[in-house]
Amino acid sequence: MSLPLSVLDLVPVTAGHSAAAALRRTTELARLAEQLGYVRYWFAEHHDMPSVASAAPEVLIAHIAAATRHLRVGSGGIMLPNHAPLRVAEAFRTLNALHPGRIDLGLGRAPGSDRKASLALRALDGEHFAELLTELRVWSGEQTLPDDHPLRTLRATPDDAPLPPIWLLGSSGASAEYAGREGMGYSFASHFSAAPPGPAFDAYRRAFRPSPNFPAPHTILGVSVVCAATAEEAEWHARAMQLAWVRIRRGQFLPLPSPQEAQHHEYAPAELPIAAQFRALTLVGTPDDVHAQIAERASRCGADEVMVVSNMADHAARLQSYALLAQAFEMTPVT
């Protein structure tokens, strides 16, 4: 069986184009992903980032689930410290009621924003994540409050629609054991984390206890990909992503540069190690090259599934990247 592939969409915003236009383009990519045979389509949550338009994943999930028929749609993820657990439970129960069996709830502990946005969101720090997750599971019906608790009789509406399967997202392995012990799915963000995913996946599998949503452990490996018909074309588009990465790491939050702008950028000495880090994390090349790199990375850590993020500035090239990857993996198109 071919390695299942999915899509992580940050809804990239390119210089000279609007965030609104980027949001509207998600439908085209999601429908293509479904047609090509991708398994899931997840949205990340980020705030106060001009290069990313996915500030409201639950809204995008509802839109894309309505625009597709079979694709699983979810969050990758909802940053739980930004939200009241009851609000998350009710939003995702509603989504699951509208699109039964097609919604995923991926949760992260990072803020997904800068300090100003965290302040505006009244966000808690990551140290409260376990407490917030426990409360969320109360509103999901998986856990109960003591009889004398003042919220004991509170119900999350709609109370006849279950919470979707919960996935914990990690970039260091800190939450892997918890995800396994609680019978959740686990996804590792190798698209931006240099930490090796293997130890986290091993800890998750060792601790795993079956649950109704996950009778067996399931791991997803996130990877950053630039795939094109030729190595030269892939390199051309990768340069724009590389420059965007360098700018973000240096605190310069701008829309994604075009490949033409990136072509003329001269890197300062302090930027070169940051650029090298991007190249170490990103798989760039022809379909055969990228196929081999993904298969090797997934095999090394035992990933059950790979989630691909391609923040390419050129929308047509981004669509083509996912199409070429599907062909390389001989995915079964959906009719």
Image (cartoon, rainbow, N blue to C red):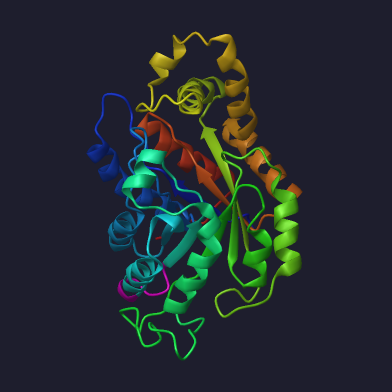
Does the magenta run of residues contain 101? yes
x, y percent for residue 303? 67, 55
The magenta stretch is 97-102
**Screen quadrant of the C terminus:** bottom left
Name the residue furthest bottom.
Answer: 147
Q: Residue at x 56, y 60 (%)?
A: 168
Asked whether, in this view, residue 106 is left or right of residue 302, the answer is left
User: Toward the viewer: 46 or 214?
Assistant: 46
At 43% from the left and 85% from the top, the residue drawn is 149
Q: Quadrant of residue 192?
A: top right
Q: Position of residue 167 (x, y in %)?
A: 54, 63
Residue 188 on the magenta segment: no
Q: Left of 205 or right of it: where is 233? A: left
Residue 290 on image: x %, y % = 61, 36
Is the residue 281 above or below the residue 238 in the image?
Answer: below
Front residue of this view, candidates 276 and 314: 276
Screen quadrant of the N terminus: bottom right
Q: Is residue 281 above or below residue 163?
A: above
- Of helix, strand and loop, which mostly describes the magenta segment? loop
